[in-house]
Image (tube, rainbow, N blue to C red):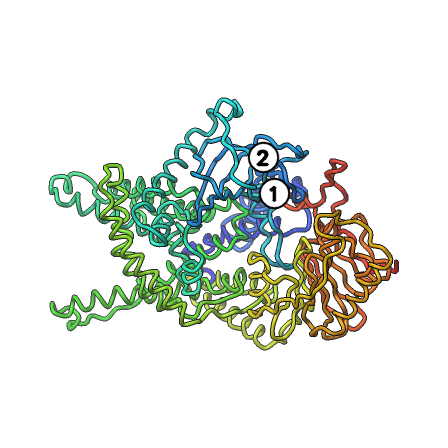
Amino acid sequence: MLGEEADHGRLLLFSPVFLGAGSAFWFLGGSDFPLVASLLCLLVSAAAVFLTGPSRPALRASFMALALFAGGMLSAQFESWRASTVILDSSVTTTVTGRVERREGDGRGRWRYILAVTGTEAPELKRPPRRITAIVRGADAPFEIGDIITGKARLTPPAGPALPALNDFSFGAYFDGIGANGFFYGAPEKLDFEAGPQAARSKDALLEWLYRLRSSIGDRIRSILPGDTGAFAAALVTDERRAISKTTTEALRQSGLAHIVAISGLNMALSAGIFFVGFRMLLSLFPGVAQAYPTKKIAAAGALIAVTAYYLISGFGVSAERAFIMMAIMLIAVFFDRPSISLRNIVLSALIIIAISPSEVLGPSFQMSFAATSALVSGYQLWKDRRVRENAFLKLPIIRPVVAVAGFFGGVFLTSLIGGFSTALFSIEHFHRLTAYGLPANLATMPIISFIVMPAGLLAMLLMPFGVDAPLWKVVGFGLDLVIAVAKTVSGWGGDIGVGRLPAWYFAVAVAGFLLLTLLRTRLRHVGTSIIAISTLIVLLLPVPRPPDLVISEDGSLVAVVAAEAIASNRENPPDFIFDQWQRALVLPTHDPPKMLDGPAIPAEGEDRRVRLSRDQQNEASAAMRAAAAGGEANRFSCVKKAWCTSKLGDGHIVTVIDNAAYLGPACDTADIVVTSVRLRFNSCRAGGTLFTGETLRRTGSVELRFAGADLEVTTAFDTLSRPWMRHRAYDWRNDRFTDSGKSGISDSDG
C-alpha cells in the first residue's frame, strides 16, 4: 500500500508538513539555532536527494523530508530577521507623534489606529516602537489615513501568555510589526501636513490609497445599513470587524458561525465561484464567442481579477491572504486544464504561505483553514470516486428537482459536518472549547450566504462606482439579519462546551493522525483514524491534571485563587482579555469577586506610592491583614480598595496582593505569597515569604502556583528571554542595555 501511495504522488503531499514542522521547531525552541548548522543540514540533505537513485524511494523520501525540515527552520529564521520589530519594553505614558496607516471603528465612537511612530517626547523613548496600535475616544471626526497626529498616550507592550502554554500575543505582534498597544488621553491633535516628516509624503502611496479606498467602502456600506447589519456587511467586504457589537460577536461564536465574518476561504470561494459561473453564463449567451474562444479560461481570468480586487480591499489580513493564494492557484490551474479542486493545489498554496510567513504555522487561523480545506477536498475525492449504481427512478422528470434540492442540502450537511469535525481539534487546542450546535446553525445559514448575501454583495460592489448599489446592499442586509437571528437563536440553546487545556502531547499526536487520515489514499489512512481514537481514549481515561492553586497575570495586577467550583480574583471587575482566557483554560465560568472591607488606603490617594509607613501604621495594617485572612471566606479575597487584598487558601497558605508598595512590609510579615505590580529592585520578603513583583513577573510572564504540603511548584510562561519576540522583557531602560536573558529571580528568601 505504501508503494501505491507513492505511485499516486501522495508522499509529495506531506512536503508542507515537513516544511511547517521545521518552522514550528525553530519557533518553539528555547533559543535561536545556529544558521550554519541549518544551512549545512539543508545542503547535505538536498545533495543526498539528488545522489540517491530512484531505486531507493524510501531513502530518497527521508532525505527530502530532512531537507524540507531544514528549509523550514531557515525560513523561520529569515522571517524573524526580516521582521526585526522593536517591541516596547514596559508600560509608559508619553507624547506620541505618528502617521495614520490604518484605522477601524468599533461602533461606539472609538477608533483604532495603526500609527507609524515618528517621534516621542516627555519622555523620549530610547527604544521607540516603529509601529503601534492606539485607541482614540472622543474625537469629533475620525482622522484620515496619511494624517499626522500627536497626543499624550499610554502605551503597553503586547501581552504575553495569559497562563503558561497559552497563546503568546507578543509573538504575533512581532511578526505583524506592532511594537506597542495603547490609547490616547483625549483626542489627539492633527498636525499640518507640512509639519509632518518629509519622508512620509510619498512613502507607501499605493498602500495608503488602498486603505483609503477600503475605509470609504466600509463607511459607504455602514451608511446604508445601520447597526450590526452594516458592520457585518462591511466586515465581509473589508474585514473591519470591530464595529460588530459584542453581543452579536458572541452569538456568532457560540453558534459556530464566527468563520463567516472573517474574510477566508468561504468568502473567497463564493466570490470566485459566483463570478466564474455568472461570467461564463454571460459569455454563453453569445454563440459566436462561445465557439471561438475558451470561455472557461476567460471566466477563470475574470474570477482571478475579482478575487485579487477583493484581496486588495480586504486589508491584507492573514486569513484573506491565505484564501487568496489558494483561490489564485485553483483558478490558474484552469488555464492549464488541470483540476481546480485537488490536494496538490492545497499543498502548493501551503508551501507558498509557509515560505513567505512561516510564523503562521503556529496560528489557529492557518491550522484551522488548511485542516478544513484538506478534509473537505479529501472527502470530495472519496465521494467522487465512489461506485454509483444507476437508478431509473431518480431520473424521472418529476423527481429530478427533488434530487437536486436534496443533493444541495446534503452537500451543505456533509460540508458542515466535515468542516466541524476537522477543526474541532484546533478549537480545543487554541480556544479550549467546542460548539455543540454549529452543524444546525451552518445548515440554516449557508443557503442564505450562498444565494442571497454573497451574490447581492458582489453585484453591489460592481455597481458601487456608479452610485446605484444601495438597493443591493438592502438585500445583503436582509440576508445578514436572518444570519444574526439564527446565530442568536442557536446561541440561546447553550452548547458552548468548555474543554480546558489538554496534555501537550495530545495535540501533536492527534494532528499527525489527522494528516495521515486526510493526505493518504489507501487503507493506510485508517492508521490516522486509529491514532486519533487511541490518543483521545488515553486522554479520557487518564486522571485529569491537577489545576493550579493560584494564578498571577504577567503584570501582577490580577491574581486569582482556583477552587473546585469557581475562580476568585482580587478585582471586582477583572479585565476581560485576561480573565476570559483563565476561565476557558481552567473551565471555571463562575467568578467570585472579592469582599470589600472598610478602611482607607495608607498613604492617602495622591501621595507617593512608595512612602514608608510609620511603625503604628505597619502594625495596624498587619493586624487588619491577619484579621481579614482569618475571618474571611476560604479561597476568596478580602480587599481594602487601592491598598491590599488577602486570602487564606483551603490548605492554610495565605496570599496577599498589594496595590501600594507601602504595604510590602506588613504583607511580607503576614503572608506566604506576596504579589505586587510595582517594579521593585528586590525580589524577596524579609520574613521568608515568596515575593512576585512587577519586575520579576515582567521577565517570567504569567505564573501558576501549586502547593504540595510545604513545597511550592512554580510554573512560569517564560524560562528564557533569548527569542526575538521576548527580548524586550530583558531590556533595562535606565542603562539602555539588555540584561541577562535567563529567568529572573523568584525566590523563597529567608530575609
Nearest the viewer among 184 and 58 is 184
- The three-letter code of the residue at mark 2 reads Val
Q: Determine the secondary structure under disc 1.
A: strand
How many angstroms separate mark 1 from mark 2 (CA)?
A: 9 Å
**What is the residue that sits farthest to the bottom in this orientation?**
541
Which residue is nearer to you in this view: 661 or 97?
661
Quarter holding the N terminus is bottom left
Residue 648: image location, x then y, percent: 74, 71
Q: Is residue 435 left or right of residue 310?
A: right
Q: How many marks?
A: 2
* Residue 658 horizontal/vertical position (percent): 73, 58
Q: Is residue 397 visible?
A: yes
Numbered label attached to residue 101: none
Q: Are marks 1 and 2 in contact (CB under 8 Å)?
A: yes
For the point 43% across and 34% down, the residue is: 144
Residue located beneath label 2 in the image: 96
Q: Give the left or right position of residue 552, taking residue 424 as reference.
A: right
The answer to which of 75 and 483 lies nearer the viewer is: 483
Sooner in the amino-acid sequence: mark 1 or mark 2:
2
The location of residue 606, given as percent across then percent down, is 70, 48
x 18%, y 39%: residue: 293
In this rendering, would 567 be left or right of 207? right
Label disc, if present, on residue 155 of the rendered structure? 1
* Quarter of the rendering containing residue 491: bottom left
Mark 1 Cα-neighbour bin, 10 Å: few <14, some 14–19, many ≥20:
many
Q: Would you identify the image quadrant in which residue 120 lies?
A: top right
Horizontal side of 343 relative to 178 (left or right) equals: left
